[in-house]
Image: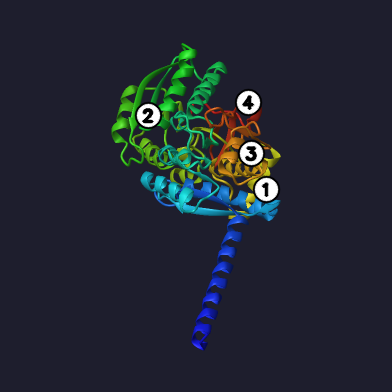
Amino acid sequence: MSSSSLVKRIKSLAVLTLLVAVLGVIGATAQDEIKIGVVLPTTGAEAKAGQYQKEGVELAIKQINAKGGIYVKEKKKKLPIKEVFYDDGTDQAKSSSLAERAMTSDNVTAMIGGYSTPLGEAESVMPDRHQTPWITAGAAATSIFSRGYKYTFGALSPIFQLGFTTAEFLGSLVDQGKLKKGLKVAMVVENTDHGVDYVNGIQDWIKKHPGYFEVVLNEKFEYKATDFSAVLQKIKTAKADIFLSDAHLPDYITMQRQYLQAGLHHQVISYGARGPEADARKALGAGTDYILAALWWSDKLPYPQAQKFVTDYKAAYGRPPDSWYAATAYDAMRILAQAIEQAGTLNKTKIRDVLAKTELKGSLLPGQVLKFGPTGQAGYPFLVTQNKPDNKVDIVYPKDAATGPPVAPIP
């Protein structure tokens, strides 16, 4: 063998050895971590809420990893979680494609994402297609969970129940003598499945309790609108006593600003699951006082684990959690971690099977247990909060969780 041939052979062996070593490292890395995809809006119209949900997920991941990660029986060790994050920019097409990218190119073990009904609906078609468990901590329209999907889960109770609880609370105000029977209700909701569910919940309670309220207006508006003057004029013409809207955060702020500018006033105002957000109170000041909201969580809940979460969140981000957004995302990550450990494997189908039947006890959420129903959606009770002067917020319903009395009618 010539010296030149020997040199070439040695070089080839060296390259082969290096390649084997690199592939070994890649393989070891893939086996030594659990990739969780997270697709949320941190830019665009829903950037604030999306950022809060991202922070909730990341706080849970940080705490789990601080304890060594998730124990996986088939690996006989704990594995750390690696977040694979994408910002969907509050764009439905982008949200769907990024969810698919995480499930395929990144081959994540599971996913959390889909803040808001439009983004959640866009992403929800991907989990069954790629047999990857997916939990939304920010979308609750029943349309997402009524299509027979097996890998789709929701950490929010249904919007229908949100509407029903709102009407139930208003009925309790009638029973207490704070409101009169037969008051007229104007409903203005976003033109989405979210809005449809809210109206159905309100009307279902009213139908079951005749004589309490009369609906005199049921109107829709376009999601992410900028001018609500036409619909506000209809509200004024309807001469209702109670104004109920279902709106996401940007629409709530814009509509309430224009409501105040139009000089409108009602005995009760609610924007569905929006009300106590810091951005709204900063933008509108006293113009948000006495607004009611039906929420999936509040930092006023007295549970020790809820208060520990508030303390930990403040320490991590330098501010308290804003409304419910971070808490539901935090528990979505916790129940996912629990399911992976109980499954004892990174097999996606086996993790999905455990998710369908597991219960997260010691949950932050009302009732202190998070579990998924037959359709994959959670079903715990709602809270009703009311903004009070000087940036105060009270839980006003149910009575056993109340931190202050409801004020009705609005002064």
Name which quarter of the figure residue 395 lies in. Answer: top right
Q: Does residue 226 sit above or below 384 in this rendering?
A: below
Q: Which residue is mark 3?
A: 364
Q: Which residue is mark 2?
A: 188
Image spot of residue 187 (x, y percent): 39, 26
Left or right: 77 in relation to 104: right
Q: Nearer the viewer, mark 3 or mark 4?
A: 3
Indicate the amino acid at tag 2.
Val
Q: CA distance from mark 1 to mark 3?
A: 30 Å
**Point 43% across, 27% down: residue:** 197
**Point 44% across, 50% down: residue:** 101
10 Å crowding of disc 4: few (<14), some (14-19), many (20+): few
Q: Nearer the viewer, mark 4 or mark 1?
A: 1
Q: Nearer the viewer, mark 3 or mark 2?
A: 3
Front one among 65 and 90: 65
Image spot of residue 60 (x, y percent): 62, 49
Q: Which residue is mark 4?
A: 399
Q: Does residue 213 sit above or below 38 in this rendering?
A: above
- Residue 243 seen in this snapshot: no
Q: CA distance from mark 2 to mark 4?
A: 28 Å
Report if the CB atoms under discs 3 and 4 are less than 8 Å apart: no
Disc on the earlier residue, 3 or 4: 3
SS at badge 2: strand
